[in-house]
Amino acid sequence: MIRRVGEHGLLVETGALDVSHRLDAALRAERPPGVVEVVPGPETVLVVAPGAEQGGLRARLGELLRRCAAAGVTEAPEEKDVVRVPVVYDGADLESVAELAGVPVDEVVARHTGRELVVGWLGFAPGFAYLTGLDPVLHVPRLATPRTSVPAGSVAVAGPYSAVYPAASPGGWRLLGRTGLRVWDVTARPPSAFRPGTRVRFEAA
């Protein structure tokens, strides 16, 4: 379904994260006239197009959505397409995550580094990527009381997601460690190291 959002937006309900990723990629490769912003979400893609003819854009989005929904799973990316994030596992919540998960600390690290995660979407703050595919054993709740400040580069987990804090900010995710990799740089093009669909692998540093 495609819904009108505000004066210039159309919200495409994709129904699945992989379809959102394919539609996002298709719109960036074949950007319709007048589209100025594409914002993918877990089961939606917001298309902002102040300069577009709404009827024509809606028809084009419907065509792309049908194509993306019918597409099969793409081939695994080459090794160079994986963003590798070196992590020093000394986070303030590492031991409490181990306790909640019912495993030793070294197993928390092994499980966090043992899977290739995928950027689902960005939100909360510029460059903050929700990484999907976290080992279910590490699905732990957020802190009951968020911290007033979490340092940039902090590597954390909350629920079914992992993340790297792109800048110092308040936050309630549980901290496993820290990385020196700069995941958000306003002078870079693109400014974020993560785009929806990007594969990410954490490595113990």
Image: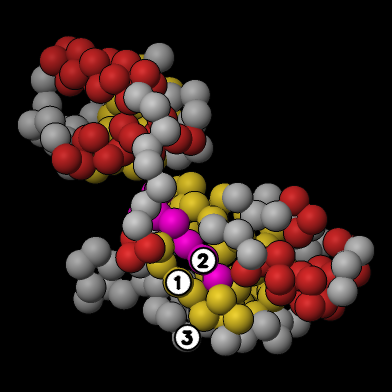
| Membership of 201 in magenta stretch | yes
Q: Are marks 2 and 1 in contact (CB under 8 Å)?
A: yes
Residue type, numbered disc 1: Arg
Which residue is more in the foreground, 118 or 35? 118
x and y percentages locating residue 14 in the rendered image: 43, 24
Vertical relation: 114 (above or below) 5: below
Mark linked to residue 201: 2
* Quarter where residue 193 is shown: bottom left
Q: Secondary structure at mark 3?
A: loop
| Membership of 113 in magenta stretch | no
Residue marked by disc 1: 84
Instruction: Determine whether, in the image, residue 92 is placed left or right of residue 113.
Output: right
Residue neighbourhood size for the residue with mark 2, other residues' Cα within 10 Å, grouped as few (<14), some (14–19), many (≥20)? some
Residue 171 can be seen in this image: no
Vertical relation: 77 (above or below) 85: above
Q: Are marks 3 and 1 in contact (CB under 8 Å)?
A: no
Residue 129 can be seen in this image: yes
Does label 3 or label 2 sit earlier along the sequence? 3
Q: CA distance from mark 3 to mark 2?
A: 15 Å
Residue type, numbered disc 3: Gly
Q: Which residues are magenta?
A: 195-202
Does label 3 or label 1 sit earlier along the sequence? 1
Residue marked by disc 3: 180
On-image quarter of the N terminus:
top left
